[in-house]
Amino acid sequence: DQQVKQNSPSLSVQEGRISILNCDYTNSMFDYFLWYKKYPAEGPTFLISISSIKDKNEDGRFTVFLNKSAKHLSLHIVPSQPGDSAVYFCAASAGGSNYKLTFGKGTLLTVNP
Amino acid sequence: KAGVTQTPRYLIKTRGQQVTLSCSPISGHRSVSWYQQTPGQGLQFLFEYFSETQRNKGNFPGRFSGRQFSNSRSEMNVSTLELGDSALYLCASSYAGAVTNEKLFFGSGTQLSVL
């Protein structure tokens, strides 16, 4: 039972354009959501997060949007850069148990020069 | 500060053997979590230790076990290895692990291949 779903295994965009990565969840107990980025041969690194009391959080070129009624979140990267090419994981936690994250399967983003 | 250190980086074992993986968290971090990453399943939570106690466990068989030492370093053990155990095993640390908005810091992982 996949509680966090990233339905697009891969996404390809041109440098300078917007990248939109999507994530859906089924567990209504999730109240904190995170995006991690992973390069090959490295561990995931934290990118941005959002609490369920918000619907948007912005950090530089990265913005995460949360639609609680649809149980959907998205990560926008504007403008996309070749260095953003990586696997992006959506993750969620419930009740402050942030050591126990439920991850999606990831989306491979390729930004073409 | 040094990051999360996992050893070894690569490991090749045969079915039926057992393996021990090691994780040294960031200095001052007392929570250590373990995750298994496979191409088909993404990252899946194995267990978490805090102050030498296992606080939570994922849905993995009893062949997967772990422990944490007084210096917060953690080891993970897999006994009677199966082909399906081939995966990247990731360790993550945080200060308390149970505080909202606290980030996890991941190591680079141990790539285990079971032949």
Image: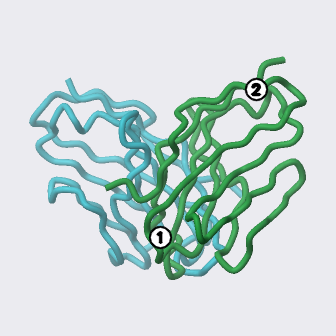
**Residue bearing mark 1:** B71
Residue type, numbered disc 2: Val
Q: Distance between the residues labelled 2 and 1?
A: 45 Å
| Colour used to depict chain A in the structure image | green
Query: Looking at the picture, which amino acid does disc 1 mark?
Result: Asn
Nearest the eye: A112 or A96? A112
Q: In which quarter of the image is the C terminus of chain B?
A: top left
Residues flagged by tags 2 and 1 on a common chain: no
Mark 2, residue position: A13
Question: Residue at left 25%, top 61%?
Answer: B59
Asked which secondary structure carries label 1, the reply is loop
Determine which of the numbered discs, if any, sits on residue B48 in the image. Answer: none
Measuring 37% from the left and 54% from the top, which residue is drawn there?
A2
The N terminus of chain B appears in which quarter of the rendering?
bottom right
Q: Is residue A109 above or below residue A44?
A: above
| Up-down relation of residue B30 to residue B115 (above or below) | below
Residue drawn at x 69%, y 80% as measured from the top left? A53
Q: Which residue lies furthest to the top in this view?
A: A113
Drawn side of residue B70 relative to residue A11, left or right: left
Q: Chain B is drawn in which colour?
A: cyan
Q: Is residue A32 above or below residue A17?
A: below
> Is residue A7 rendered to the left or right of residue B28?
left
Secondary structure type for disc 2: strand
- Residue B87 picture location, percent across and down: 35, 36
Between B37 and A93, the residue placed more toward the observer is: A93
Residue A81 percent across, percent down from the top left:
84, 31
- Label 1: how many Cα within 10 Å (few below 14, some 14–19, many 20+): some
